[in-house]
Amino acid sequence: MILDLKTKVDKLGIEDRVSRITKRSLKSEAKLQGLKMILSMIDLTTLEGMDTNKRVEQLCYKATHLHQELPELPNVAAVCVYPNMVKTASNSLKDSEVKVASVATAFPSGNSSLEVKIQETKEAVFNGAEEIDMVISRGKFHSGEYNYVFDEIAIIKENCGDKARLKVILETGELGDYDHIRLASEIAIKAGADFIKTSTGKIKPAATLPITLVMLEAIKDHYYNTGKMVGMKPAGGISNSKLALQYLVMVKETLGNLWLDKHWFRFGASSLANDVLMQILKQKTGVYQSNNYFSKG
Amino acid sequence: MSKRIKVLKTYKIFIDGKFPRTESGRYTQLKKDNLTIANVCLSSRKDIRNAVLSARNAFESWSSKSAYNRSQILYRIAEMMEGNKNQFIEELILQGEEFNKAILEIDQSIDRIIYFAGWPDKINPIFGSVNPVASSHFNFTILEPMGVVGIVASEENSLLGLISSIIPIILSGNTCVTIVSEKLPLCAISLAEVISNSDVPNGVVNIITGSKDELAPHLAQHMDVNALGVNIDNKELKNQMFFQASNNLKRVVDVSKYKIEDSSFESPYIVKKFMEAKTTWHPIEKDFTSTNNY
Protein backbone atom coordinates (compact mmCIF):
# COMPACT_ATOMS: atom_id res chain seq x y z
CA MET A 1 0.00 0.00 0.00
CA ILE A 2 1.27 3.46 -0.82
CA LEU A 3 -0.11 6.26 1.26
CA ASP A 4 0.35 9.90 0.58
CA LEU A 5 1.36 11.00 4.03
CA LYS A 6 1.90 14.58 2.99
CA THR A 7 -1.72 15.71 3.12
CA LYS A 8 -1.67 18.37 5.79
CA VAL A 9 -4.88 19.80 7.16
CA ASP A 10 -5.34 23.55 7.22
CA LYS A 11 -6.42 23.82 10.87
CA LEU A 12 -7.45 27.48 10.81
CA GLY A 13 -9.22 27.05 7.50
CA ILE A 14 -11.26 24.11 8.82
CA GLU A 15 -12.25 25.89 11.99
CA ASP A 16 -13.12 29.09 10.17
CA ARG A 17 -15.38 27.22 7.79
CA VAL A 18 -17.10 25.44 10.65
CA SER A 19 -17.70 28.71 12.46
CA ARG A 20 -19.37 30.12 9.35
CA ILE A 21 -21.52 27.01 8.95
CA THR A 22 -22.73 27.23 12.55
CA LYS A 23 -24.04 30.73 11.91
CA ARG A 24 -26.53 29.53 9.28
CA SER A 25 -30.04 29.07 10.42
CA LEU A 26 -32.74 26.92 8.88
CA LYS A 27 -36.32 28.05 9.35
CA SER A 28 -39.86 26.72 8.92
CA GLU A 29 -40.33 24.43 5.90
CA ALA A 30 -36.60 23.85 5.28
CA LYS A 31 -36.10 23.13 8.97
CA LEU A 32 -38.93 20.59 9.01
CA GLN A 33 -37.49 18.88 5.97
CA GLY A 34 -34.06 18.80 7.60
CA LEU A 35 -35.46 17.39 10.83
CA LYS A 36 -37.20 14.55 9.02
CA MET A 37 -34.01 13.82 7.13
CA ILE A 38 -32.09 13.65 10.41
CA LEU A 39 -34.59 11.12 11.78
CA SER A 40 -34.13 8.91 8.73
CA MET A 41 -30.34 9.00 9.22
CA ILE A 42 -30.16 8.08 12.90
CA ASP A 43 -28.48 4.89 14.08
CA LEU A 44 -30.38 4.39 17.32
CA THR A 45 -27.70 3.09 19.62
CA THR A 46 -27.44 1.20 22.88
CA LEU A 47 -23.94 0.12 23.84
CA GLU A 48 -23.97 -0.42 27.58
CA GLY A 49 -22.62 -3.24 29.69
CA MET A 50 -26.06 -3.51 31.25
CA ASP A 51 -27.95 -4.00 27.96
CA THR A 52 -30.58 -6.71 28.19
CA ASN A 53 -32.66 -8.44 25.53
CA LYS A 54 -35.71 -6.50 26.66
CA ARG A 55 -33.83 -3.22 26.43
CA VAL A 56 -32.79 -4.02 22.84
CA GLU A 57 -36.34 -5.10 21.94
CA GLN A 58 -37.67 -1.86 23.35
CA LEU A 59 -35.17 0.14 21.32
CA CYS A 60 -36.15 -1.77 18.17
CA TYR A 61 -39.81 -1.01 18.89
CA LYS A 62 -38.91 2.64 19.23
CA ALA A 63 -36.98 2.49 15.93
CA THR A 64 -40.13 1.47 14.10
CA HIS A 65 -42.68 3.47 16.12
CA LEU A 66 -41.09 6.85 16.73
CA HIS A 67 -44.13 8.80 17.82
CA GLN A 68 -47.72 7.70 17.40
CA GLU A 69 -49.09 11.20 17.03
CA LEU A 70 -46.96 11.70 13.92
CA PRO A 71 -47.45 8.56 11.82
CA GLU A 72 -46.05 10.12 8.63
CA LEU A 73 -42.51 10.26 10.03
CA PRO A 74 -39.72 8.17 8.51
CA ASN A 75 -38.16 5.37 10.56
CA VAL A 76 -34.59 5.63 11.77
CA ALA A 77 -31.89 4.05 9.61
CA ALA A 78 -30.57 1.37 11.92
CA VAL A 79 -30.33 0.03 15.45
CA CYS A 80 -26.76 -0.34 16.68
CA VAL A 81 -26.00 -2.96 19.35
CA TYR A 82 -23.28 -5.22 20.77
CA PRO A 83 -22.66 -8.51 18.89
CA ASN A 84 -24.43 -10.67 21.49
CA MET A 85 -27.62 -8.64 20.92
CA VAL A 86 -27.65 -8.98 17.12
CA LYS A 87 -30.01 -11.97 17.12
CA THR A 88 -32.50 -10.19 19.35
CA ALA A 89 -32.40 -7.03 17.27
CA SER A 90 -32.58 -8.93 14.03
CA ASN A 91 -35.68 -10.82 15.20
CA SER A 92 -37.38 -7.66 16.38
CA LEU A 93 -36.69 -5.85 13.11
CA LYS A 94 -37.29 -8.63 10.60
CA ASP A 95 -40.46 -7.07 9.19
CA SER A 96 -39.04 -3.58 8.84
CA GLU A 97 -36.55 -1.74 6.70
CA VAL A 98 -34.54 -0.69 9.73
CA LYS A 99 -31.07 -2.23 9.52
CA VAL A 100 -29.28 -4.07 12.29
CA ALA A 101 -25.80 -2.70 12.96
CA SER A 102 -23.33 -4.34 15.29
CA VAL A 103 -20.11 -3.06 16.74
CA ALA A 104 -17.31 -5.60 16.48
CA THR A 105 -13.53 -6.10 16.82
CA ALA A 106 -13.32 -5.80 20.59
CA PHE A 107 -15.31 -2.56 20.76
CA PRO A 108 -14.55 -0.02 22.20
CA SER A 109 -10.80 -0.51 22.81
CA GLY A 110 -9.97 -2.74 19.85
CA ASN A 111 -7.32 -4.42 21.97
CA SER A 112 -7.62 -8.04 21.02
CA SER A 113 -5.99 -10.47 18.63
CA LEU A 114 -6.88 -10.43 14.95
CA GLU A 115 -8.32 -13.97 15.20
CA VAL A 116 -10.75 -12.92 17.90
CA LYS A 117 -11.79 -9.86 15.89
CA ILE A 118 -12.41 -11.91 12.76
CA GLN A 119 -14.42 -14.46 14.71
CA GLU A 120 -16.52 -11.76 16.32
CA THR A 121 -17.24 -10.17 12.95
CA LYS A 122 -18.18 -13.49 11.34
CA GLU A 123 -20.53 -14.29 14.16
CA ALA A 124 -22.26 -10.91 14.03
CA VAL A 125 -22.75 -11.19 10.26
CA PHE A 126 -23.97 -14.77 10.59
CA ASN A 127 -26.50 -13.71 13.22
CA GLY A 128 -27.96 -11.10 10.89
CA ALA A 129 -25.94 -7.89 11.25
CA GLU A 130 -26.26 -5.87 8.04
CA GLU A 131 -23.71 -3.31 9.12
CA ILE A 132 -20.50 -3.79 11.11
CA ASP A 133 -19.00 -0.92 13.12
CA MET A 134 -15.35 -1.83 13.72
CA VAL A 135 -12.73 0.10 15.69
CA ILE A 136 -9.19 0.60 14.42
CA SER A 137 -6.17 -0.33 16.56
CA ARG A 138 -5.19 3.07 17.88
CA GLY A 139 -2.13 1.70 19.66
CA LYS A 140 -0.75 0.35 16.40
CA PHE A 141 -1.62 3.60 14.65
CA HIS A 142 0.34 5.64 17.19
CA SER A 143 3.28 3.24 16.89
CA GLY A 144 3.40 4.07 13.20
CA GLU A 145 2.29 0.58 12.13
CA TYR A 146 -0.08 1.94 9.50
CA ASN A 147 0.17 -1.23 7.42
CA TYR A 148 -1.13 -3.28 10.33
CA VAL A 149 -4.10 -0.94 10.71
CA PHE A 150 -4.73 -1.08 6.96
CA ASP A 151 -4.52 -4.88 6.77
CA GLU A 152 -6.79 -5.30 9.75
CA ILE A 153 -9.51 -3.17 8.16
CA ALA A 154 -9.09 -5.00 4.84
CA ILE A 155 -9.46 -8.43 6.42
CA ILE A 156 -12.52 -7.44 8.43
CA LYS A 157 -14.03 -6.03 5.25
CA GLU A 158 -13.33 -9.35 3.57
CA ASN A 159 -15.17 -11.15 6.37
CA CYS A 160 -18.17 -8.86 6.04
CA GLY A 161 -18.45 -10.12 2.48
CA ASP A 162 -21.42 -8.78 0.54
CA LYS A 163 -23.76 -9.29 3.45
CA ALA A 164 -22.71 -6.34 5.59
CA ARG A 165 -21.44 -2.83 5.02
CA LEU A 166 -18.39 -1.87 7.04
CA LYS A 167 -18.14 1.29 9.13
CA VAL A 168 -14.68 2.05 10.45
CA ILE A 169 -14.49 3.91 13.75
CA LEU A 170 -11.36 6.04 13.99
CA GLU A 171 -11.96 7.13 17.61
CA THR A 172 -10.76 10.63 16.80
CA GLY A 173 -10.65 11.59 20.48
CA GLU A 174 -7.60 9.34 20.79
CA LEU A 175 -5.89 10.28 17.55
CA GLY A 176 -4.61 13.74 18.40
CA ASP A 177 -4.43 16.42 15.75
CA TYR A 178 -6.26 16.87 12.43
CA ASP A 179 -3.32 15.50 10.41
CA HIS A 180 -3.62 12.16 12.21
CA ILE A 181 -7.37 12.12 11.68
CA ARG A 182 -6.89 12.82 7.98
CA LEU A 183 -4.30 10.04 7.74
CA ALA A 184 -6.48 7.54 9.60
CA SER A 185 -9.41 8.46 7.33
CA GLU A 186 -7.32 7.78 4.24
CA ILE A 187 -6.10 4.44 5.58
CA ALA A 188 -9.66 3.37 6.36
CA ILE A 189 -11.03 4.51 3.00
CA LYS A 190 -8.28 2.85 1.01
CA ALA A 191 -8.59 -0.37 2.98
CA GLY A 192 -12.20 -0.65 1.82
CA ALA A 193 -14.40 1.06 4.43
CA ASP A 194 -17.97 1.71 3.30
CA PHE A 195 -18.33 4.33 6.01
CA ILE A 196 -15.88 6.17 8.21
CA LYS A 197 -17.11 7.00 11.69
CA THR A 198 -15.70 9.43 14.22
CA SER A 199 -16.08 7.84 17.61
CA THR A 200 -17.21 5.01 19.82
CA GLY A 201 -19.07 7.42 22.08
CA LYS A 202 -17.02 6.13 25.03
CA ILE A 203 -14.23 8.69 24.77
CA LYS A 204 -14.51 12.46 24.99
CA PRO A 205 -14.26 14.49 22.85
CA ALA A 206 -16.49 12.45 20.55
CA ALA A 207 -17.78 13.83 17.24
CA THR A 208 -17.23 17.53 16.62
CA LEU A 209 -17.97 19.62 13.54
CA PRO A 210 -14.30 20.36 12.65
CA ILE A 211 -13.25 16.71 12.97
CA THR A 212 -16.17 15.65 10.82
CA LEU A 213 -15.21 18.26 8.24
CA VAL A 214 -11.66 16.89 8.07
CA MET A 215 -13.08 13.43 7.42
CA LEU A 216 -15.57 14.75 4.84
CA GLU A 217 -12.67 16.37 2.98
CA ALA A 218 -10.87 13.02 2.87
CA ILE A 219 -14.03 11.44 1.44
CA LYS A 220 -14.30 14.22 -1.12
CA ASP A 221 -10.70 13.83 -2.31
CA HIS A 222 -11.17 10.08 -2.60
CA TYR A 223 -14.32 10.65 -4.66
CA TYR A 224 -12.50 13.05 -7.01
CA ASN A 225 -9.59 10.61 -7.42
CA THR A 226 -11.49 7.38 -7.87
CA GLY A 227 -15.17 8.21 -8.40
CA LYS A 228 -16.10 6.02 -5.44
CA MET A 229 -18.40 7.19 -2.69
CA VAL A 230 -17.71 6.54 0.99
CA GLY A 231 -20.23 7.21 3.77
CA MET A 232 -19.75 9.29 6.90
CA LYS A 233 -21.04 8.75 10.42
CA PRO A 234 -20.38 11.21 13.20
CA ALA A 235 -21.20 9.59 16.55
CA GLY A 236 -21.32 10.63 20.18
CA GLY A 237 -22.24 13.99 21.64
CA ILE A 238 -24.81 14.96 19.01
CA SER A 239 -27.88 15.27 21.18
CA ASN A 240 -29.80 18.22 19.82
CA SER A 241 -31.48 19.09 16.53
CA LYS A 242 -29.72 22.39 16.07
CA LEU A 243 -26.31 20.72 16.03
CA ALA A 244 -27.54 17.89 13.81
CA LEU A 245 -28.88 20.43 11.29
CA GLN A 246 -25.44 22.05 11.22
CA TYR A 247 -23.94 18.68 10.33
CA LEU A 248 -26.40 18.37 7.46
CA VAL A 249 -25.49 21.82 6.17
CA MET A 250 -21.82 20.87 6.33
CA VAL A 251 -22.36 17.62 4.43
CA LYS A 252 -24.36 19.35 1.74
CA GLU A 253 -21.77 22.06 1.26
CA THR A 254 -18.78 19.71 1.31
CA LEU A 255 -20.04 16.65 -0.55
CA GLY A 256 -23.29 17.75 -2.17
CA ASN A 257 -26.81 16.31 -2.39
CA LEU A 258 -25.65 12.78 -3.23
CA TRP A 259 -24.59 12.29 0.38
CA LEU A 260 -27.85 13.59 1.86
CA ASP A 261 -29.20 10.08 2.13
CA LYS A 262 -29.19 7.47 4.84
CA HIS A 263 -27.16 5.23 2.55
CA TRP A 264 -24.22 7.67 2.81
CA PHE A 265 -24.69 9.65 5.98
CA ARG A 266 -25.64 8.59 9.50
CA PHE A 267 -25.83 9.98 13.00
CA GLY A 268 -24.76 7.69 15.82
CA ALA A 269 -26.88 8.86 18.73
CA SER A 270 -29.24 7.71 21.42
CA SER A 271 -30.96 10.86 22.65
CA LEU A 272 -31.01 12.85 19.39
CA ALA A 273 -34.20 11.20 18.11
CA ASN A 274 -36.34 12.53 20.96
CA ASP A 275 -35.03 16.05 20.55
CA VAL A 276 -35.78 15.95 16.82
CA LEU A 277 -39.29 14.64 17.54
CA MET A 278 -39.88 17.45 20.02
CA GLN A 279 -38.69 20.00 17.46
CA ILE A 280 -40.95 18.58 14.76
CA LEU A 281 -43.93 18.74 17.11
CA LYS A 282 -42.98 22.28 18.12
CA GLN A 283 -42.79 23.21 14.44
CA LYS A 284 -46.28 21.77 13.83
CA THR A 285 -48.08 22.98 16.94
CA GLY A 286 -46.14 26.09 17.97
CA VAL A 287 -45.92 24.70 21.52
CA TYR A 288 -42.65 23.87 23.26
CA GLN A 289 -42.55 20.18 24.15
CA SER A 290 -41.58 18.12 27.18
CA ASN A 291 -39.43 15.00 27.26
CA ASN A 292 -42.07 13.39 29.50
CA TYR A 293 -44.34 12.70 26.53
CA PHE A 294 -41.80 10.80 24.43
CA SER A 295 -40.67 7.22 24.91
CA LYS A 296 -37.30 6.87 26.57
CA GLY A 297 -36.24 4.17 24.12
CA MET B 1 -9.67 67.08 37.92
CA SER B 2 -12.13 66.06 35.25
CA LYS B 3 -15.71 65.32 36.14
CA ARG B 4 -16.30 61.64 36.89
CA ILE B 5 -18.44 59.77 34.36
CA LYS B 6 -21.33 57.96 35.97
CA VAL B 7 -21.26 54.16 35.71
CA LEU B 8 -24.74 52.94 34.87
CA LYS B 9 -25.96 49.41 35.40
CA THR B 10 -27.01 47.26 32.47
CA TYR B 11 -30.23 45.53 33.44
CA LYS B 12 -30.12 42.05 31.96
CA ILE B 13 -32.26 38.97 32.41
CA PHE B 14 -31.44 35.99 34.67
CA ILE B 15 -31.34 32.49 33.18
CA ASP B 16 -29.53 29.44 34.57
CA GLY B 17 -27.55 31.53 37.05
CA LYS B 18 -26.19 33.78 34.32
CA PHE B 19 -27.12 37.27 33.20
CA PRO B 20 -27.49 37.11 29.42
CA ARG B 21 -29.04 39.77 27.21
CA THR B 22 -32.24 38.62 25.55
CA GLU B 23 -31.72 36.21 22.67
CA SER B 24 -33.74 38.59 20.46
CA GLY B 25 -31.42 41.55 21.06
CA ARG B 26 -34.45 43.81 21.63
CA TYR B 27 -34.75 46.25 24.48
CA THR B 28 -37.02 49.00 25.66
CA GLN B 29 -36.25 52.25 27.43
CA LEU B 30 -37.70 52.70 30.86
CA LYS B 31 -38.54 56.39 31.29
CA LYS B 32 -39.49 58.67 34.09
CA ASP B 33 -40.33 62.33 33.45
CA ASN B 34 -38.92 61.94 29.92
CA LEU B 35 -35.57 60.81 31.33
CA THR B 36 -34.27 57.35 30.55
CA ILE B 37 -33.80 55.37 33.75
CA ALA B 38 -32.63 52.12 32.24
CA ASN B 39 -32.58 49.93 29.16
CA VAL B 40 -34.62 46.80 29.83
CA CYS B 41 -34.52 43.57 27.82
CA LEU B 42 -37.62 42.87 25.73
CA SER B 43 -37.30 39.11 25.95
CA SER B 44 -38.63 36.65 23.39
CA ARG B 45 -40.19 33.19 23.44
CA LYS B 46 -36.73 31.67 23.02
CA ASP B 47 -35.65 33.19 26.32
CA ILE B 48 -38.70 31.52 27.88
CA ARG B 49 -37.63 28.24 26.25
CA ASN B 50 -34.08 28.53 27.61
CA ALA B 51 -35.35 29.45 31.06
CA VAL B 52 -37.74 26.48 31.23
CA LEU B 53 -34.92 24.19 30.15
CA SER B 54 -32.67 25.47 32.90
CA ALA B 55 -35.46 25.24 35.48
CA ARG B 56 -36.12 21.65 34.42
CA ASN B 57 -32.44 20.74 34.75
CA ALA B 58 -32.24 22.37 38.18
CA PHE B 59 -35.36 20.64 39.53
CA GLU B 60 -33.87 17.28 40.42
CA SER B 61 -31.03 18.54 42.57
CA TRP B 62 -33.02 21.38 44.18
CA SER B 63 -35.96 19.17 45.13
CA SER B 64 -33.69 16.46 46.49
CA LYS B 65 -31.79 18.79 48.79
CA SER B 66 -32.80 18.33 52.40
CA ALA B 67 -35.65 20.63 53.40
CA TYR B 68 -33.44 22.01 56.15
CA ASN B 69 -30.80 22.96 53.60
CA ARG B 70 -33.35 24.78 51.43
CA SER B 71 -34.37 26.63 54.56
CA GLN B 72 -30.80 27.79 55.13
CA ILE B 73 -30.44 28.92 51.53
CA LEU B 74 -33.67 30.96 51.67
CA TYR B 75 -32.51 32.57 54.89
CA ARG B 76 -29.31 33.46 53.10
CA ILE B 77 -31.32 35.37 50.45
CA ALA B 78 -32.78 37.50 53.23
CA GLU B 79 -29.34 38.14 54.69
CA MET B 80 -27.98 39.24 51.34
CA MET B 81 -30.98 41.53 50.76
CA GLU B 82 -30.44 43.18 54.10
CA GLY B 83 -26.93 44.08 52.96
CA ASN B 84 -28.20 45.46 49.65
CA LYS B 85 -31.10 47.44 51.12
CA ASN B 86 -29.93 50.81 49.81
CA GLN B 87 -29.82 49.63 46.25
CA PHE B 88 -33.41 48.38 46.44
CA ILE B 89 -34.58 51.60 48.10
CA GLU B 90 -32.92 53.68 45.37
CA GLU B 91 -34.58 51.60 42.67
CA LEU B 92 -37.99 51.72 44.32
CA ILE B 93 -37.71 55.50 44.49
CA LEU B 94 -36.52 55.65 40.90
CA GLN B 95 -39.63 53.71 39.96
CA GLY B 96 -41.75 56.37 41.65
CA GLU B 97 -42.15 55.13 45.23
CA GLU B 98 -41.99 57.50 48.18
CA PHE B 99 -38.98 57.12 50.49
CA ASN B 100 -40.95 55.94 53.52
CA LYS B 101 -42.97 53.46 51.51
CA ALA B 102 -39.82 52.15 49.86
CA ILE B 103 -38.27 51.41 53.25
CA LEU B 104 -41.47 49.74 54.36
CA GLU B 105 -41.58 47.58 51.25
CA ILE B 106 -37.98 46.38 51.52
CA ASP B 107 -38.36 45.61 55.23
CA GLN B 108 -41.58 43.76 54.61
CA SER B 109 -39.94 41.83 51.76
CA ILE B 110 -37.00 40.71 53.87
CA ASP B 111 -39.26 39.73 56.76
CA ARG B 112 -41.41 37.74 54.38
CA ILE B 113 -38.42 35.75 53.15
CA ILE B 114 -37.46 35.05 56.77
CA TYR B 115 -41.02 33.95 57.49
CA PHE B 116 -41.12 31.48 54.60
CA ALA B 117 -37.52 30.33 55.16
CA GLY B 118 -38.78 28.61 58.29
CA TRP B 119 -41.26 26.45 56.41
CA PRO B 120 -39.42 23.92 54.18
CA ASP B 121 -38.94 21.25 56.86
CA LYS B 122 -42.34 21.88 58.46
CA ILE B 123 -44.66 21.54 55.47
CA ASN B 124 -44.80 17.75 55.49
CA PRO B 125 -45.02 17.35 59.27
CA ILE B 126 -48.12 19.55 59.14
CA PHE B 127 -49.83 18.66 55.85
CA GLY B 128 -48.64 15.10 55.53
CA SER B 129 -50.75 12.42 57.17
CA VAL B 130 -50.99 8.81 58.15
CA ASN B 131 -54.39 7.60 57.00
CA PRO B 132 -56.53 4.97 58.68
CA VAL B 133 -57.39 2.15 56.23
CA ALA B 134 -59.21 -1.15 56.66
CA SER B 135 -56.67 -3.39 54.96
CA SER B 136 -53.24 -4.42 56.19
CA HIS B 137 -51.47 -1.41 54.81
CA PHE B 138 -49.55 1.43 56.28
CA ASN B 139 -51.11 4.29 54.34
CA PHE B 140 -49.55 7.74 54.31
CA THR B 141 -49.72 10.96 52.33
CA ILE B 142 -46.88 13.36 51.71
CA LEU B 143 -46.68 16.54 49.68
CA GLU B 144 -44.16 16.77 46.86
CA PRO B 145 -43.07 19.71 44.70
CA MET B 146 -44.75 19.88 41.29
CA GLY B 147 -41.75 20.64 39.09
CA VAL B 148 -41.27 23.73 36.97
CA VAL B 149 -43.68 26.53 37.89
CA GLY B 150 -44.34 29.45 35.56
CA ILE B 151 -44.88 32.69 37.44
CA VAL B 152 -46.37 35.89 36.10
CA ALA B 153 -45.62 38.39 38.83
CA SER B 154 -47.66 41.38 39.93
CA GLU B 155 -47.48 44.64 37.96
CA GLU B 156 -47.56 46.70 41.17
CA ASN B 157 -45.58 45.88 44.32
CA SER B 158 -42.55 45.23 42.17
CA LEU B 159 -40.45 43.83 45.02
CA LEU B 160 -42.86 42.49 47.64
CA GLY B 161 -45.11 41.02 44.96
CA LEU B 162 -42.22 39.28 43.31
CA ILE B 163 -40.88 37.81 46.53
CA SER B 164 -44.34 36.69 47.57
CA SER B 165 -44.64 34.82 44.28
CA ILE B 166 -41.20 33.24 44.10
CA ILE B 167 -40.31 32.24 47.67
CA PRO B 168 -43.40 30.16 48.63
CA ILE B 169 -43.07 28.31 45.32
CA ILE B 170 -39.40 27.40 45.42
CA LEU B 171 -39.28 26.58 49.12
CA SER B 172 -40.90 23.18 48.60
CA GLY B 173 -38.42 22.20 45.87
CA ASN B 174 -40.11 23.64 42.79
CA THR B 175 -38.05 25.64 40.32
CA CYS B 176 -39.51 28.63 38.52
CA VAL B 177 -39.53 30.85 35.47
CA THR B 178 -40.79 34.31 36.35
CA ILE B 179 -42.06 37.03 34.05
CA VAL B 180 -41.77 40.22 36.09
CA SER B 181 -43.54 43.58 36.19
CA GLU B 182 -43.42 45.29 32.82
CA LYS B 183 -43.34 48.86 34.06
CA LEU B 184 -41.36 48.29 37.28
CA PRO B 185 -38.67 45.74 36.43
CA LEU B 186 -35.61 47.23 38.18
CA CYS B 187 -35.95 45.52 41.57
CA ALA B 188 -36.48 42.18 39.86
CA ILE B 189 -33.05 42.26 38.30
CA SER B 190 -31.44 43.36 41.55
CA LEU B 191 -33.26 40.52 43.28
CA ALA B 192 -31.76 38.18 40.68
CA GLU B 193 -28.31 39.46 41.63
CA VAL B 194 -29.03 38.80 45.29
CA ILE B 195 -30.29 35.30 44.49
CA SER B 196 -27.22 34.55 42.40
CA ASN B 197 -25.10 35.47 45.47
CA SER B 198 -27.08 33.35 47.91
CA ASP B 199 -26.19 29.69 47.31
CA VAL B 200 -29.39 29.21 45.31
CA PRO B 201 -28.36 26.70 42.62
CA ASN B 202 -28.37 27.89 39.00
CA GLY B 203 -31.72 27.54 37.27
CA VAL B 204 -33.91 27.37 40.41
CA VAL B 205 -35.03 30.95 39.82
CA ASN B 206 -35.12 32.45 36.32
CA ILE B 207 -36.18 36.03 35.76
CA ILE B 208 -37.41 37.39 32.43
CA THR B 209 -38.35 40.96 31.58
CA GLY B 210 -40.49 42.05 28.65
CA SER B 211 -44.05 42.20 27.40
CA LYS B 212 -46.44 39.97 29.33
CA ASP B 213 -48.89 39.83 26.43
CA GLU B 214 -46.14 38.40 24.26
CA LEU B 215 -44.38 36.11 26.74
CA ALA B 216 -47.03 34.75 29.10
CA PRO B 217 -48.86 32.59 26.50
CA HIS B 218 -45.63 30.75 25.66
CA LEU B 219 -45.12 29.99 29.32
CA ALA B 220 -48.75 28.94 29.72
CA GLN B 221 -48.72 26.43 26.85
CA HIS B 222 -45.20 25.07 27.40
CA MET B 223 -45.54 21.29 27.84
CA ASP B 224 -42.65 21.14 30.31
CA VAL B 225 -44.18 23.62 32.77
CA ASN B 226 -46.17 21.88 35.53
CA ALA B 227 -48.02 24.73 37.20
CA LEU B 228 -48.77 28.43 36.85
CA GLY B 229 -48.87 31.11 39.49
CA VAL B 230 -50.52 34.10 37.89
CA ASN B 231 -50.85 37.51 39.49
CA ILE B 232 -52.23 39.83 36.83
CA ASP B 233 -55.32 41.99 36.50
CA ASN B 234 -55.67 41.70 32.74
CA LYS B 235 -58.69 39.34 32.61
CA GLU B 236 -58.37 38.55 28.93
CA LEU B 237 -54.74 37.47 29.23
CA LYS B 238 -55.46 35.55 32.40
CA ASN B 239 -58.30 33.59 30.79
CA GLN B 240 -56.19 32.91 27.73
CA MET B 241 -53.39 31.56 29.92
CA PHE B 242 -55.69 29.37 31.97
CA PHE B 243 -57.16 27.95 28.78
CA GLN B 244 -53.73 27.25 27.29
CA ALA B 245 -52.57 25.68 30.55
CA SER B 246 -55.06 22.86 30.00
CA ASN B 247 -52.94 21.29 27.24
CA ASN B 248 -50.89 19.35 29.76
CA LEU B 249 -53.23 19.81 32.71
CA LYS B 250 -51.09 22.39 34.50
CA ARG B 251 -52.34 23.41 37.88
CA VAL B 252 -53.22 27.11 37.78
CA VAL B 253 -53.25 29.32 40.84
CA ASP B 254 -54.70 32.81 40.62
CA VAL B 255 -52.38 34.62 43.03
CA SER B 256 -54.19 37.93 42.46
CA LYS B 257 -56.88 36.67 44.84
CA TYR B 258 -54.46 36.99 47.75
CA LYS B 259 -53.74 40.24 49.52
CA ILE B 260 -50.00 40.44 49.02
CA GLU B 261 -49.44 43.59 51.11
CA ASP B 262 -51.29 42.07 54.02
CA SER B 263 -49.51 39.98 56.64
CA SER B 264 -52.30 37.41 56.24
CA PHE B 265 -50.46 36.33 53.09
CA GLU B 266 -47.86 34.79 55.35
CA SER B 267 -49.30 31.31 55.67
CA PRO B 268 -48.24 27.80 54.65
CA TYR B 269 -51.43 27.34 52.60
CA ILE B 270 -49.95 29.28 49.69
CA VAL B 271 -47.02 26.83 49.73
CA LYS B 272 -49.40 23.88 49.66
CA LYS B 273 -51.07 25.26 46.52
CA PHE B 274 -47.94 24.46 44.53
CA MET B 275 -47.45 20.95 45.87
CA GLU B 276 -48.85 17.59 44.83
CA ALA B 277 -50.10 15.04 47.34
CA LYS B 278 -48.74 11.52 47.01
CA THR B 279 -50.40 8.67 48.88
CA THR B 280 -48.57 5.41 49.44
CA TRP B 281 -50.07 2.06 50.39
CA HIS B 282 -47.31 0.15 52.10
CA PRO B 283 -48.14 -3.52 52.82
CA ILE B 284 -47.62 -4.54 56.42
CA GLU B 285 -48.26 -7.62 58.46
CA LYS B 286 -51.54 -7.16 60.28
CA ASP B 287 -50.81 -7.11 63.97
CA PHE B 288 -54.02 -8.31 65.65
CA THR B 289 -52.74 -7.61 69.11
CA SER B 290 -52.28 -3.96 68.29
CA THR B 291 -55.01 -1.58 69.27
CA ASN B 292 -54.28 1.18 66.78
CA ASN B 293 -56.29 1.57 63.59
CA TYR B 294 -53.61 1.52 60.95
Image: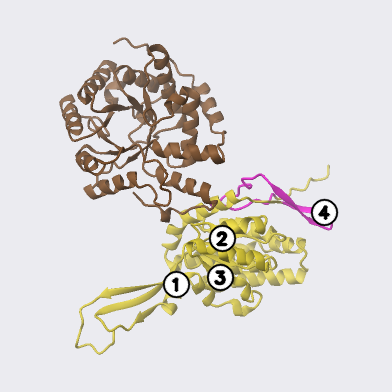
Residue identified by numbered label 4: B35
In primary-sequence order, the first of circles 4 and 2 is: 4
Colour assigned to chain B in the rendering is: yellow
**Which one is in front in this view, the residue at disc 4 or the one at disc 2?**
2
Mark 4, other Cα within 10 Å: few <14 / some 14–19 / many ≥20: few
| Element on which disc 1 rests | loop
Please say whether residue B37 is one of the residues in the magenta stretch. Answer: yes
Q: In the rendered structure, which segment of residues is drawn in magenta?
A: B10-39
Q: Main secondary structure of the magenta part?
A: loop
Left or right of residue B155, residue B79 in this image: left
Q: Which chain is brown?
A: A
In primary-sequence order, the first of circles 2 and 1 is: 1
Q: Quadrant of the N terminus of chain B?
A: top right
Is B112 drawn above or below residue A41 in the view shown?
Answer: below
**What type is the residue that disc 1 sits on?**
Asp
What distance separates the C-alpha of mark 2 from that of mark 3? 12 Å
- Residue at (46, 58) in percent of width and height: B59
| Element on which disc 2 rests | helix
| Chain containing mark 1 | B
- Between B284 and A168, the one lying in front of the other is A168
Q: Give yes or no for contact between labels 4 and 2 (Cβ–Cβ under 8 Å).
A: no
